[in-house]
Structure formats: C-alpha cells, structure tokens
Image (cartoon, helix red, strand yellow):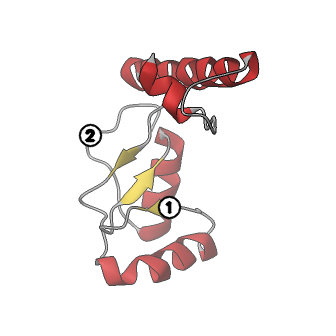
Amino acid sequence: MTKILKECGCEFGACCTRDCLERANVELRKRKMESRLKTCGIIKSKLSDALAVHPTQVAEAIADAKKKGVPTDFAPDGRPIITSRNHQKRYLRAYGFFNRDSSYGD
C-alpha cells in the first residue's frame, strides 16, 4: 500500500485526503485489470520479429504503413506492434506476405 500512496502525487509524501487515496486505488484497479486482460489474451497486441525493420527506418515504416492504409506502430527496436488478427491480416496483405500459421478466419 505504501508504494501506491507514494505514486498518488501527494505533496506530503503520504496521502492526506480521501481523494488522493481514491485516485491511487483507481490506478491500482486499472493496472490489475489490464494485467488480467493481457493474461487472458483479450488484449492481443504482439511484436513481430519476422516483419521487423531496422531501428533507423522506424519513422519511414510508420509513414509507409499509414500510406498503405494499415496504420501500425513500431517498437523502438523496429518490430511492428500487431494489435489484432485482423490488423495482422491487413498488414500482411498490404506488403505481399501471408501467415502460414493462420486458420480459416485469417
């Protein structure tokens, strides 16, 4: 609990008001829920090693993906962040690739 209290931004170093404590609890619940969603696979963003670009080409790759109609973010190391199966399908089609591990829905 002390870690949360320090993160609430209270100027006294400890929560002095109910609002500070409430904000800290809301943030904790939000983090726990996000963690659970990632564990359950509901949030399915993933990084692709096979589709990576050189780190110096990240800005160019972002612009090119947007130009091709598939806006895609890239990690600083050059790997594209694929947000869903549909996003992956559209990205692969735009660049002339295909996923050999896909199923009927892909």
Marks 2 and 1, how far apart in space? 23 Å
The relative height of residue 87 versus residue 53 in the rendered view (above or below) is: above
The relative height of residue 36 versus residue 44 in the rendered view (above or below) is: above
Task: Name the residue beneath numbered marker 1.
Answer: 73
Question: Which residue is at a point 54% across and 33% down the rendered structure image?
Answer: 13
Mark nearest the camera among 2 and 1 is 1
Task: Name the residue beneath numbered marker 2.
Answer: 101
Q: What amino acid is labelled 1 in the image?
A: Asp
Residue 42 seen in render = no
Residue sitting farthest toward the front: 12
The relative height of residue 24 versus residue 55 in the rendered view (above or below) is: above
Query: Horizontal placement of 31 versus 17: left or right?
Result: left
Q: What amino acid is labelled 2 in the image?
A: Asp
Q: Split into 4 quadrants, where in the image is the N terminus?
A: top left
In the rendering, at what x and y percent does residue 61 appear? 46, 76
Q: Split into 4 quadrants, where in the image is the C terminus?
A: top left
The relative height of residue 53 versus residue 90 in the rendered view (above or below) is: below
Question: Which residue is at a point 72% across and 20% down the rendered structure image?
Answer: 17
Q: Residues within 10 Å of mark 1 (few under 14, many from 20)?
A: some
Question: Which residue is at a point 31% across and 63% down the rendered structure image?
Answer: 51
